[in-house]
């Protein structure tokens, strides 16, 4: 009985992105809002990806100094929400710190 339940859970996790959100993108760079990640972000905005997906940028400094775009959120790198998003995001673009 227990092995049957285990198999059902394993198959469910293998067949779908159970924990992953297909519409979440994480970005990180150090210094904030710089390097190649900034160019990827600019291209995502230019192509309108933020209309369909949520974009989270992990920052180390002040969150208020950046322009607000639709579906773009700036989050402190060491926050609890950032830890949860690391496990749920489908795409991660990081530049200097492996998140």
Image (cartoon, grey):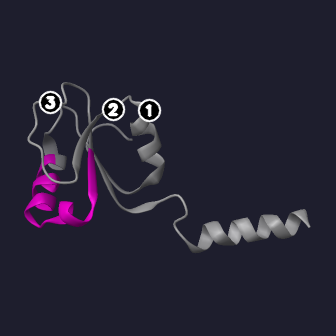
In which image quadrant can residue 2 be found? bottom right
Q: Which residue carries the number 1 mark?
A: 80
Q: Residue at x 42, y 60 (%)?
A: 21
The answer to whether marks 2 and 3 mark residues whose Cβ atoms lie closer than 8 Å is no
Question: Which numbered circle lies on residue 37?
Answer: none
Q: Residue at x 28, y 56 (%)?
A: 54
Could you tell whether 6 is left or right of 57 in the image? right
**Label 2: few (<14), some or many (≥20) within 10 Å?**
some
Q: Secondary structure at mark 2?
A: loop
Residue range (magenta): 38-56
**From the viewer's perspective, is residue 48 above or below residue 33?**
below
Q: Earlier in the sequence, mark 1 or mark 3?
A: 3
- Locate residue 23, reporting x and y percent: 34, 63
Real-space Cα separation, disc 2 to disc 1, in angstroms: 9 Å
Q: Which residue carries the number 3 mark?
A: 64
Chief secondary structure of the magenta portion = helix
Q: Which residue carries the number 2 mark?
A: 77
Real-space Cα separation, disc 1 to disc 3, in angstroms: 19 Å
Quarter of the image with the C terminus in it:
top left
């Amino acid at each position: 009985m227990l092995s049957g339940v285990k198999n059902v859970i394993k198959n469910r996790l293998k067949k779908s992105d159970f924990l992953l959100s297909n519409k979440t993108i994480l970005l990180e760079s150090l210094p904030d809002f710089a390097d190649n990640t900034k160019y990827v972000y600019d291209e995502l905005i230019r192509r309108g990806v933020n209309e369909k997906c949520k974009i989270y940028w992990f920052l180390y400094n002040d969150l208020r100094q950046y322009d607000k775009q639709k579906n773009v959120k700036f989050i402190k790198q060491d926050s609890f929400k950032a830890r949860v998003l690391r496990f749920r995001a489908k795409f991660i673009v990081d530049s200097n710190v492996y998140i």
